[in-house]
Image (spheres, rainbow, N blue to C red):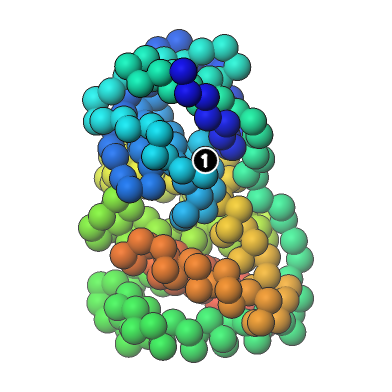
Amino acid sequence: MIQIGAVYSSYAASLLHDAFHPLQVEAVFQTGYNIRAGANLLYIGTTKNGYAPFGIHMKTVDQLKWRVGDCLLVGTGATIHHISTGVTVYPNQVMRMKVERIKPDPVQFERNIEEMNRFLKKLGHDWSRAYREKEQPLYDYLSNIGQEKGKQLIGYGKGLTPSGDDVIVGYMAVCEVLGRPMGWQVDYVSSAKYRTTRSSVAYYEAALRGEYTNELNRLITALLTRSPSDWQSDWERLIEFGSSSGQDTALGIYLALKYEMEDMVR
């Protein structure tokens, strides 16, 4: 019997306490697994890409050796059992993922938006360039997040989490930290269930609960209140995430912060 202690997100811990059916391995990655839990999705893996709001995280997945289609049994105390390999995953910590709201420092905020714009230009990120150069139809979609046109971004692009979804989630995260009303959020999340990937839907549903990765929360807080030297390392980690997911999320953060600054000076 192999027992592995893990850090459970509060959502994962709650979901597994109420689980009455086996879980199933849906996808296998180098750093972890996507797990089907009824109509819900969990991620079990390392923290290489941060702590997911629907995640169960451990130092290494080398001992798991699970395959797509494998069944996992849920036991007392949100434990997870893989019978054939004798592996049991148990919670040794439960992490709260809900973001804390803050008030921006106007001076640092304005300076950081200028720095973000410079960094995005330097990256050569295609979507950022399309926004700057007002390329249609992408410019219209990016300029109207929260409106009907902005819904075109849902599922737009390729990959496990399409680019449009990453942009929207980054945008939502800023609104959440600032405590800005998102009357459009439920409509967007409902639409996502029929228009994009299960991984993206899991991030959208987490956003609806006010939950984002700790890394994203920390970066946005620093962008609103601190000097560039205090957030550059978190920025660099974000933009290195996935093939383009981190850069897409960064664009969403930038767009939301830019809109907030424009609103402040009106």
Horizontal placement of 92 versus 212: left or right?
A: right
Residue 155, given in percent of the width and then of the height, sits at 28, 53
Q: Secondary structure at mark 1?
A: loop
Q: Residue at x 51, y 36 (%)?
A: 56
Which amino acid, by three-letter code, is at mark 1? Met
Quadrant position of residue 62: top left
Residue 187, given in percent of the width and then of the height, sits at 43, 44
Residue 127 visible, this orientation = yes
Residue 70, given in percent of the width and then of the height, sits at 28, 23
**In the depicted view, which residue is nearer to us: 94 or 133?**
94
**In the depicted view, which residue is nearer to us: 208 or 181?**
208
Q: Residue at x 46, y 43 (%)?
A: 60
**In the depicted view, which residue is nearer to us: 27 or 133?**
27
Extreme front residue here? 1
Q: Is residue 140 above or below residue 194?
A: below
Residue 102, given in percent of the width and then of the height, sits at 74, 61
Q: Is residue 61 above or below residue 218?
A: above
Q: Is residue 57 above or below residue 91?
A: below
Q: Residue at x 27, y 58 (%)?
A: 156
**In the depicted view, which residue is nearer to us: 213 or 260?**
213
Q: Which image quarter is the C terminus in?
A: bottom right
Mark 1 neighbour class, 10 Å CA radius: few under 14, some 14 to 19, many 20 or more: many
Q: Is residue 55 above or below residue 23?
A: below
Q: Residue at x 45, y 10 (%)?
A: 20
Q: Please state the total of marks drawn on the protein image.
A: 1
Residue 15 visible, this orientation = no
Residue hosting label 1 = 58
Horizontal placement of 162 versus 220: left or right?
A: left
Horizontal placement of 13 versus 199: left or right?
A: right
